[in-house]
Image: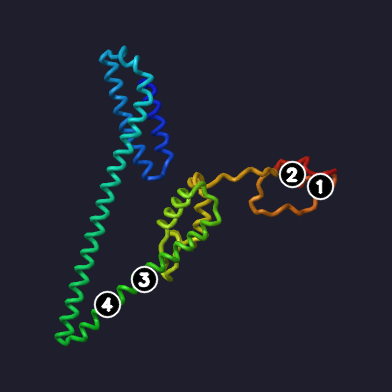
Amino acid sequence: MSIEEIKKLIADLEAKKSETTDKGELAKLEIQLQEAQKSLEEAEAAEQEGDDDDTNQSNDDDDDDIEARIERLAEEKLAKMKANMDKMAEKLAKSEKEKADLAKARKEEKMKKLEEEGKLQELAEMRVAEANAELDLLRQENTSLKRDQVVSSALATLEFKNDRSREMARRDIVDNLEQDDDGNWVSKDGKTIASFVEEYSKDTNNEFLFRSKPNTGGGKDNPGGKSDTSPKKGILEMTGDELLEMARKGKLGSFGY
């Protein structure tokens, strides 16, 4: 593979990287870019050393080898990264569970001691606090569930390019929601979820998430969605002001005589 071909490969990878939003795909493309850059540096170094004769003989064989090597190394590094992340997640989950179990054991031990000592008032207060904490957690989960249901319902009316686009929009919308004083979920500027989702779908910065609507023709768009039912006048029936207004709108010639 020549230097120019490697540069083209790098440009293609950079273009793909700028277009994708998937974290896994981004990581893979980043590794492929790093390996392609290394290959470019090696090719440029070989050219400077005057190894053109040797490399030209094996150019055709090397074309596929370089791309295959980049792909293979990217897959290997991603596999190692995923394995390390899985191990870290497993250790974190185990550590959190151990902390939770330890805190629960200490609380139960303290409550048992209070009961043995006859400190029933303090014991009752601990049990009430524990019950309230569990109730608050359930309320938070229920509130988040209702929020997600409303968001999903609003998004169901939209046509996304794919599931990845839908999930990206859902996360973006949820991140911009908060609860008002009455506990209702609204956008940060106070709009309802339905209104915010509609506004989000019409934002030109988000149009890449949605399927483009086919042009069905029929002339200019009518934003209000209402047809013009006013009676048509012939040119001889119109006043001078009406003729000037029609000319300004570019509609002269659109009526009968």
Q: Mark 1 and mark 3: span between their CA atoms?
A: 70 Å
Residue 88: x and y in percent read 25, 52
Residue 186: x and y in percent read 45, 63
Q: Which image quarter: residue 128?
A: bottom left
Q: Give yes or no for contact between labels 2 and 1 (Cβ–Cβ under 8 Å).
A: yes
**What residue is drawn where x is 77% and y is 42%?**
254
Q: Say which label, 2 or 4, has the lower sequence index.
A: 4
Q: Which mark is residue 238?
A: 1
Q: Mark 3 and mark 4: span between their CA atoms?
A: 14 Å
Crowding around mark 3 (Cα neighbors within 10 Å: few <14, some 14 to 19, many 20+) is few
Crowding around mark 4 (Cα neighbors within 10 Å: few <14, some 14 to 19, many 20+) is few
Amino acid type of the residue tagged 3 in the rendering: Leu
Quadrant, the C terminus: top right
Q: Which mark is residue 138?
A: 3
Q: Which residue is mark 2?
A: 246
Q: Nearer the viewer, residue 84 or 230?
A: 84
Q: Say which label, 3 or 4, has the lower sequence index.
A: 4
Is the residue 228 above or below the residue 130 in the image? Answer: above
- Of circles 1 and 3, which is in front? 3
Amino acid type of the residue tagged 4 in the rendering: Ala
**What residue is drawn where x is 37% and y is 23%?**
63
Q: Which mark is residue 179?
A: none
Q: Which image quarter: residue 100?
A: bottom left
Is the residue 18 above or below the residue 190 in the image? Answer: above
Q: Say which label, 1 or 3, has the lower sequence index.
A: 3
Q: Which residue is mark 4?
A: 129
Mark 4 residue element = helix
Q: Nearer the viewer, residue 144 or 50?
A: 50
Amino acid type of the residue tagged 1 in the rendering: Met
Label count reads 4
Amino acid type of the residue tagged 2 in the rendering: Met
